[in-house]
Image: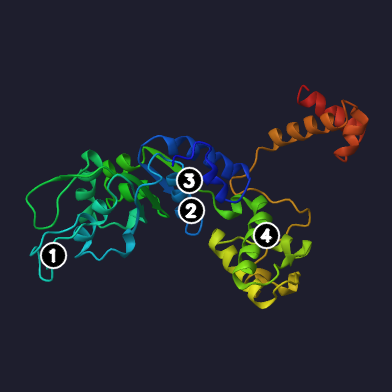
Amino acid sequence: MFDTNNNAFTAIVGHSPALESVIRTAQVAAAADVHILIEGETGTGKELMARALLKSSSRADKPFVVINCAALPAELAESLLFGHEKGAFTGADERRDGYVQKAKDGTLFLDEIGDLPLSQQAKLLRFVENGECQRVGSHEMERVDVRILAATHRNLLQLVNTGEFRQDLYYRLSVVTLRLPNLHERRGDIADLAKYFLQQSAERNKTEPCTLSPGALNQLKHYPWPGNIRELKNICEHISALMPGELINEENLPLVIRENTSTSKSGYILPEHGIDMETLEIDLIKQALDYSGGNKSRAAKLLGLSRDAFLYRLKKHNL
């Protein structure tokens, strides 16, 4: 059934602005029967997003076929994708459907589309453009109605520029593009994600869930997470297996976390994309005035400023 309330997206844990922005776009795109490209580093949850899109689409009760393009053997890729006729090649002892036919009327998830060989990209392009494909060993074209969700951890536009990916195929697949943020771009979600994974692990192992001390959680928030959410999940499973039901302190975290944590004395973390200091200052002044009900002395105190310094900034920003 089509999930008109987009409840499928609740499976994606987190409320950070970076994530919520993507989910809002995904909720709208899910209902439109168009091809979608999902970009993001390894471990950011691209397949989870694809499944949420599927469940919120009109094809939710139709086949969902997953293909790892990076794992397709070059010599068998065409047959695996589009099927083959009996006798088409040595060992083809019967007529077989490919992934495309198996996904008929449903959704085809092309994971790691950036690794699809150029030789197969032209054949995929024809299918994406008009829904036509040709089995190996056949002279007839078949029409198959399929929606495509493609995902990649690579920069496809860069691959287009280097001639490794077809430009026409890129634009056909990216009618809507969703870029999943890295975990270090959504550090505010780390506590919820860790709690979720620890609970999952405890249920699977039939134990009590671990809890994280403030110090341990602070270290997790300052770790760079090169493996993104997948790495966090593995860390939580490691902790849960070794210390079921216990309070996890900083010294209980894996060595890789403790040795690669860059902490800030202030506790504030500069976003990777940087900030606009003037905009930030104006925003903080407005928040202080709101909290203080317009009382300038109290607002100044909230910001750790003298009244004169606060009044100077009000004048400076014409507030």
Report, in whole angstroms, how far the alpha carbon at label 4 lies from the one at label 2. Answer: 18 Å
Report, in whole angstroms, how far the alpha carbon at label 3 lies from the one at label 2. Answer: 13 Å
At x 93%, y 31%, the residue is: 297
- Comparing 312 with 36, the one in front is 36
Circles 1 and 2 in contact, beta carbons < 8 Å: no
**Colour mode?**
rainbow
Mark 3 surroundings within 10 Å by alpha-carbon count, few (fewer than 14), some (14 through 19), many (20 or more): some
At x 14%, y 54%, the residue is: 135
Residue 260 occupies quadrant: bottom right
Residue 313 bears which disc, if any?
A: none
The residue tagged 4 is 195
Secondary element type, mark 3: strand
Which badge, 4 or 3, comes first in the chain's sequence? 3
The residue tagged 1 is 94
Picture coordinates of residue 240 (x, y %)? 65, 72
The residue tagged 3 is 179
